[in-house]
Amino acid sequence: MPMAEKVDQMNPDEKIVEIAIERLRVFENHPFRVEMDSQMKDLQDSIKKYGIITPVIVRPRKEGYYEIISGHRRIFAAEKLGYRKVPTIIRYMTDDQAVIAMVDSNLQRERIQPSEKAFAYKMKYDVLKRKSGRRKAGQVDHNSGKKGLEIISEETGDSPKQVQRYIKMADLIPELLEKVDDGSMGFTPAVQIAYLKKREQKDILDAMELTLCTPSLSQAMRMKKLSADGKLTTQRVEDILSEIKQKETDRVVFKNDQLHKYFPKNYSTEQMKREIIELLKLYVLNY
């Protein structure tokens, strides 16, 4: 049974009740973004047509409110549509049970950012590690006979090694995580940089802006080694990122915003490329 179905499935003694949205609170340290994207618009369209088909799951808190376990996006969409109450299942859970249920209910989403997956895996792994009663990474869960990394791997489809990489990436500073999410920095170099001190990561971020370059895997590994040896200075970071990468020795790179001011706004990258080549041919013929 998929993780989300296990979370959302009602127990025989549970019932659906209507709870005011104002009494609901976001899960503490919720790692998943809830924003008005294309998926949210699709969800809103669905709610307009059919209502909220799947009730949200919450747990009661002693402060008098309910903490959302599953359904952050449904609640956001419903509230934007003017809903004041949502169908809800109240479930009593320990803190660790709540973390696992919250993570499992969100990991089934179609599109998940690397940073979301990193923090979600880390939250679940920390719970599994506590449950095993051991401190060392990868220790066996005595209830299942499997290691925490293996449990997450089996449930998500990522290899245990890949799960471990995601968990490590949670150590990146927010600005670098954002670059992984938007695709401007590669996943594997980011994992290597996550081993660096926060100050060193900030130096890398500054150097990336200065040089307009992102670190390759080999550069990231070199900086990791220099950091471990206590030799990674700001200047060394800038020197490494200023190097011409092997694949770039035979090409010239322009950013789109550097070129668009010379071309019609509706020109695609390919159209600009063809136009530049034709202009260069004319230049050579007339030189």
Image (spheres, helix red, strand yellow):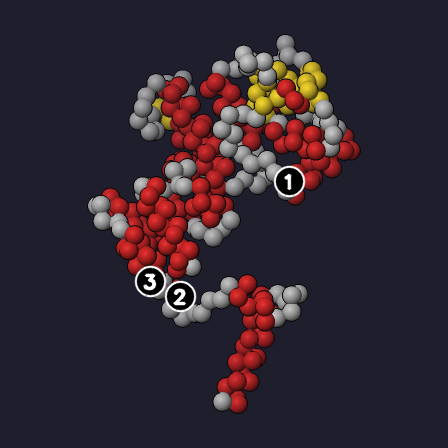
Q: Residue 193, relative to residue 156: is it above or below? A: below
Q: Earlier in the sequence, mark 1 or mark 3?
A: 1
Outermost residue, bottom direction? 286
Q: CA distance from mark 3 to mark 2?
A: 10 Å
For label 1, the crowd category at 10 Å Cα-Cα, with few meaning under 14, some 14 to 19 and many 20 or more, is: few
- At 49% across and 66% down in the image, what residue appears? 254
The residue type indicated by label 2 comes to Glu
Which SS class for mark 1? loop
Of residues 160 and 16, the one nearer the viewer is 16
Residue 286 showing in the rendered view = yes
**Residue picked out by circle 3:** 243
For label 2, the crowd category at 10 Å Cα-Cα, with few meaning under 14, some 14 to 19 and many 20 or more, is: few
| Residue 215, quarter of picture | bottom left
Image position of 170 (left or right of 256): left
Q: Residue 178, relative to residue 156: is it above or below? A: below
**Residue picked out by circle 2:** 248
**Residue picked out by circle 1:** 36
Residue 265 image offset from top left, x and y in percent: 65, 65
